[in-house]
Image (spheres, rainbow, N blue to C red):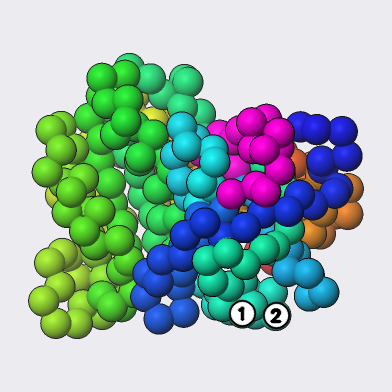
């Protein structure tokens, strides 16, 4: 990271804006300084702090493939003071970018193994970069299973991507919705109920989970009960990230600062902490 890069935002412009669904957009950003573009790199699972000048910053996971660092993807839901103007940005608009921050997914140690991706809601955004990474380097990994859960069927974004991934050899996709809606193609119920419908191979599979914490806690407990080692389960946590450097303390979880030590943790590290109500 450049000197001062942890604190000083770099200017980026919106190279592409994609309306995913009402209130959710993907912004592909390009740093305006050519030298900054050349130096920039990230790992799947890391995040950037995106800033709207005169408004503030918010932590957003990077949703694109690290092989294309000049078009840095962020999928954003309109939920608050900073995300509202972010979602309203158009192509050519400029904003601040700090990062990347945090520890990403354990892709190096997952090579040669099966990968199970379990996500809920917009939790799919941080792992889309993982899926695209694996798809672009398919021979390095074993069987890929993608399980995505949503509350309402209409909440599912990137349906064409899921359909395309499902057609890839040695890849299985399962969808679940609590409330299916019309023409819902998947399971009705919890995403963790899909564990009974796919082939699971404990000890040979790296599991990557992202989404609401109750879903991840339930999923991790179920997989451990099915024989998965806790060291093979990886969770991407969301906390109140303010600084991105583990200095302000807003994202502290026991001995960890999620923005700095995470956001990706092994379940063996944080499982006992996540079981403490209110922590």
User: Which residue corresponds to mark 1?
Assistant: 84
Q: Residue at x 56, y 60 (%)?
A: 14
> On the picture, is 201 further left or further right than 23?
left
- Answer above or below: position of 117 versus 202: below
User: Which residue corresponds to mark 2?
Assistant: 81
The local secondary structure at tag 2 comes to loop
- Mark 1 touching mark 2, by CB under 8 A? yes
Which x, y percent locates residue 63? 48, 50
> On the picture, is 213 further left or further right than 112?
right
Q: Residue at x 35, y 41 (%)?
A: 131
> Callout 1 environment at 10 Å: few (<14), some (14 to 19), or many (20+)?
some
**The N terminus lies in quadrant:** top right
Which x, y percent locates residue 147? 28, 51
The stretch of residues the image draws in magenta is: 30-46
> On the picture, is 161 further left or further right than 62?
left
Is 269 in front, or is 48?
48
Which quarter of the picture shows residue 22? bottom left
Using the rendered image of the protein, determine whether residue 212 is visible from the camera's viewpoint.
Answer: no
Tell me how far mark 1 sits from mark 2, CA to CA: 6 Å
């Amino acid at each position: 990271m450049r000197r001062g890069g942890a604190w000083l935002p770099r200017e980026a412009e919106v190279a592409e804006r994609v309306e995913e669904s009402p209130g959710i957009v993907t912004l592909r950003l390009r740093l305006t300084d050519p030298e900054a573009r050349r130096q920039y790199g990230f790992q799947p699972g890391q995040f950037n702090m995106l800033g709207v000048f005169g408004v503030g910053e918010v932590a957003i996971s990077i949703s694109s493939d690290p092989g294309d660092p000049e078009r840095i993807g962020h999928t954003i839901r309109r939920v608050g003071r900073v995300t509202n103007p972010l979602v309203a940005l158009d192509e050519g608009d400029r904003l601040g970018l700090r990062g990347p921050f945090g520890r990403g997914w354990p892709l190096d140690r997952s090579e040669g193994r099966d990968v199970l991706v379990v996500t809920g809601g917009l939790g799919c955004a941080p792992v889309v970069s993982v899926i695209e990474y694996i798809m672009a380097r398919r021979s390095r990994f074993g069987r890929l299973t993608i399980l995505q859960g949503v509350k309402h069927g209409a909440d599912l974004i990137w349906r064409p991507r899921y359909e395309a991934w499902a057609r890839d050899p040695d890849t299985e996709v399962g969808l679940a919705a609590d409330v299916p809606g019309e023409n819902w193609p998947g399971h009705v119920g919890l995403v963790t109920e899909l564990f009974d419908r796919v082939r699971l191979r404990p000890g040979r599979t790296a599991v990557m989970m992202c989404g609401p914490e109750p879903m991840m806690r339930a999923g991790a407990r179920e997989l451990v009960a099915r024989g998965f080692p806790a060291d093979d389960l990886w969770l991407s946590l969301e906390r109140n990230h303010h600084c991105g450097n583990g200095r302000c303390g807003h994202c502290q979880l026991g001995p960890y600062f999620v923005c700095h030590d995470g956001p990706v943790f092994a379940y063996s590290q944080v499982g006992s902490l996540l079981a403490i109500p209110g922590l």
